[in-house]
Amino acid sequence: MPSFQTTPGTRDILPPHAGRWREFTRIFAQEVEASGYQCIIPPMFEDIGVFQRLGDATDVVTKEMYDFVDKGDRHIALRPEHTASVCRAFAQHRPLAPWKVWYSGPNFRYEKAQAGRYRQFDQVGIEALGVDDPQLDIEVIALGWHFYKALGLKKVELIINSLGDAGDRERYVDALEKYFSSNISSLSQEAQATLQRNPLRVLDSKREQDAAVISGAPVISDFLSSGAAEHFNSVLSGLRELNIPFTVNDKLVRGLDYYRRTTFEYISSALDSAQNAVGGGGRYDGLVEDLGGPATPGIGFALGVDRTLLACDAEECFLPVAPRMDAFIIDTVNGTHATRIAHILRAAGFNVDRAYEGRSMKSQMKAADKSGATCAVIIGEDEAAQSTCTVRNLSTSEQVNIPQSTLFTYMSELVGAREPRRPQQ
Ligand code: AMP
């Protein structure tokens, strides 16, 4: 056993999986930049107050924060999510609205670590600030939906609800509190404890014992103001227009307290039901103001990278691929020919690997096969003496001997023209 291993809830993302993560972000960026969202990189830690605005009744804030006092006596927390940081950035820099940004990066929550639930996990997401038009809600929800499609996922479902405006939500929470309190003896111990902290979250309980009480609970749709109801209807009809299937679930309240009006979640039916939410989001029309900025509506979503990739594994789509390798250089003379040729080919835009430490021809050939390269470029004593090289096509095993000076042209024909990386010397 080595002295150290990753701590619970953290993982090494090894090759080729790490390459898949980068590709994931690249496709996401491409999708959202095409709709006017630009990249933002907020810090990974902030004054804890930024995240405390997420709500006292939120587990993320009360139980799961990674916080510490730094050497300057500041109370700091590692970010548990990005939305609060983006809203803090908006309040701090006051960019012109609408402000449409996207992000990708790790978050930290001290959760009970298990498959699909980690203490360090990645999210990609978007936030759009300064507009309360329901057409924006449709754009945001559709972007998440189409991104899942771009990955090849077929078993993602969209669940949607409206939590109404602040006043609607307050009246609803009051009604829920009364209802659950009058049925308290039928609730599980856990739900009773949740009721003390946040009656809304009792709706999240997946315990069988709570199901009957929850099914008879008041529903938010009866508490929506006419403005919130109209907004919600516009969002639903926009989604229908775009042929995006959805299910309205009036029990969808989501984990964070800041949501207003539209809330939604993407669920993968390919994953185990305990960890099947692959992404979610909603409107948070009071958050910027809570952080000291001007009253600003906002909407966004965060998609869990770890969990979405588990869904890809389950659906066998968007599988990891090793980076392209064009040539593997085998030098059985002294290694310096490989250094020179690799240098020239890499500068010309080819992807090139090689062996080291003067290994035998057989061992270098094995390494070439393992590399996944299209061809091996072999320099033995004869080739070195005549300034030639033997190029072996690793899938057909065909070999040709050519002058080294024509290798560039030969490679371009074999694997296609590449964009030079550096000017040739
Ligand atoms: P949230 O920020 O809680 O709304 O979560 C948005 C998405 O992030 C979820 O749907 C999950 O896919 C993912 N997520 C949240 N917490 C975790 C975690 N502890 N481990 C892995 N993924 C997570």
Image (spheres, helix red, strand yellow):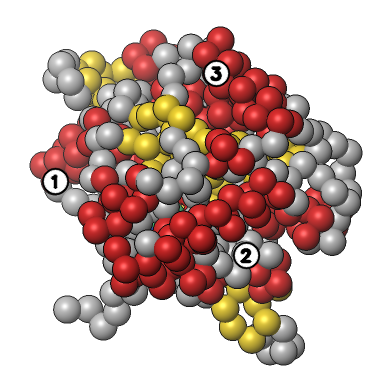
Residue 126 in the image: state x and y as whole percent: 62, 39
Asked whether the viewer can see residue 269, the reply is: yes
**Which quadrant is the N terminus positioned in?**
bottom left
- The numbered mark at residue 55 is 2
Is 312 situated left or right of 21 in this image?
A: left
Observer-nearest of 271 and 316: 271
| Precedes in sequence: disc 3 or disc 2 | 2
Residue 184 in the image: state x and y as whole percent: 37, 66
Element carrying mark 3? helix
Observer-nearest of 418 and 121: 121
C-alpha distance separating marks 3 and 2: 30 Å
Element carrying mark 1? helix
Residue 408 in the image: state x and y as whole percent: 44, 20
On screen, residue 71 above or below 315: below
Location of mark 3 (residue): 239
Q: How many labels does the image show?
A: 3
Location of mark 1 (residue): 363
Instruction: Tell me the amino acid under the disc marked 3.
Output: Leu
